[in-house]
């Protein structure tokens, strides 16, 4: 499956595409490229230009954030809230969660005057759906509700870490 086919599948929330990404141990670089491009699109769409140096720091922050969130998701989903058939590793979570950031590629449209007001809300719900499916497939869950809970709890904990636990990383 090509990167374009994977992106299309992720953007259309096709579970089989997340399964393909999960199984492809060679898709790590692709997933990280999606994270970097999505973070750049979000920065441009949010009017956070700040020059090349700032954009590079934002991209690094997005990758560090993804790794942190994937590790939290691993602990929550595999260790604390597994289903009987749950089998996963951090690499699988990094791949699917990296690709799950693809809806942020459309965040660049946040810079469009009228659309810019609604774009962040649409993308937020799209990301929530994308991450929920990614986690459900990577953790081999049968329950979408359980995957949703793992995503929300992991995200809330990640936000807490970002804002209160290790703020020096994000303020470089």
Image (cartoon, rainbow, N blue to C red):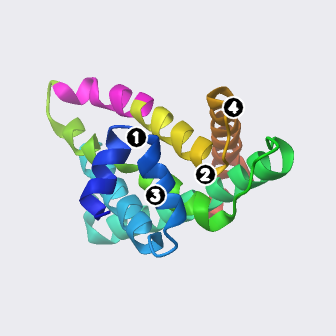
Q: Is residue 22 left or right of residue 110?
A: right
Residue appearing at x 37%, y 55% in the figure:
39
Query: Residue 113, how many percent across, how many down?
Result: 14, 29
Badge 3: few (under 14), some or many (20 or more) residues near its Cα, within 10 Å? some
- Can you identify the residue that label 2 sits on? 138
Residue toward you, 89 or 66: 89
Distance between the Cα atoms at labels 1 and 2?
13 Å
Q: Is residue 151 above or below residue 38?
A: above
- Can you identify the residue that label 1 sits on? 14
Residue appearing at x 55%, y 58% in the figure:
66
Distance between the Cα atoms at labels 4 and 2?
15 Å
Q: Is residue 47 left or right of residue 84?
A: left
Distance between the Cα atoms at labels 1 and 4?
20 Å
Q: Give the mark nearest the N terminus, 1 or 2.
A: 1
Mark 1 touches mark 2? (CB < 8 Å):
no
Quadrant in which residue 71 is drawn: bottom right
Residue appearing at x 36%, y 34% in the figure:
123
Can residue 111 be seen from the camera position used here?
yes
The nearer-to-camera label among 4 and 2 is 2
Q: Give the mark nearest the N terminus, 3 or 2.
A: 3
Residue toward you, 74 or 58: 74
Which element carries disc 1, helix, strand or loop?
A: loop
């Amino acid at each position: 499956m090509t990167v374009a086919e994977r992106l299309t599948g992720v953007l259309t929330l096709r579970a089989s595409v997340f399964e393909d990404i999960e199984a492809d141990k060679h898709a790590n670089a692709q997933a990280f490229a999606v994270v970097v491009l999505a973070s750049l699109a979000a920065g441009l769409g949010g009017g956070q230009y700040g020059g090349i140096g700032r954009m590079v720091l934002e991209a690094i922050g997005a990758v560090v954030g993804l790794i942190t969130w994937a590790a939290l998701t691993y602990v929550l989903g595999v260790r604390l809230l597994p289903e009987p058939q749950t089998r996963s590793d951090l690499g699988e979570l990094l791949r699917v969660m990296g690709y799950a950031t693809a809806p942020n590629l459309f965040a660049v449209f946040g810079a469009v005057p009228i659309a810019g007001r609604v774009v962040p809300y649409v993308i937020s719900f799209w990301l929530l759906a994308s991450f929920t499916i990614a986690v459900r497939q990577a953790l081999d869950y049968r329950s979408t509700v359980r995957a949703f809970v793992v995503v929300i709890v992991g995200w809330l904990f990640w936000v807490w870490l970002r804002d209160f636990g290790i703020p020096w990383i994000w303020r470089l």
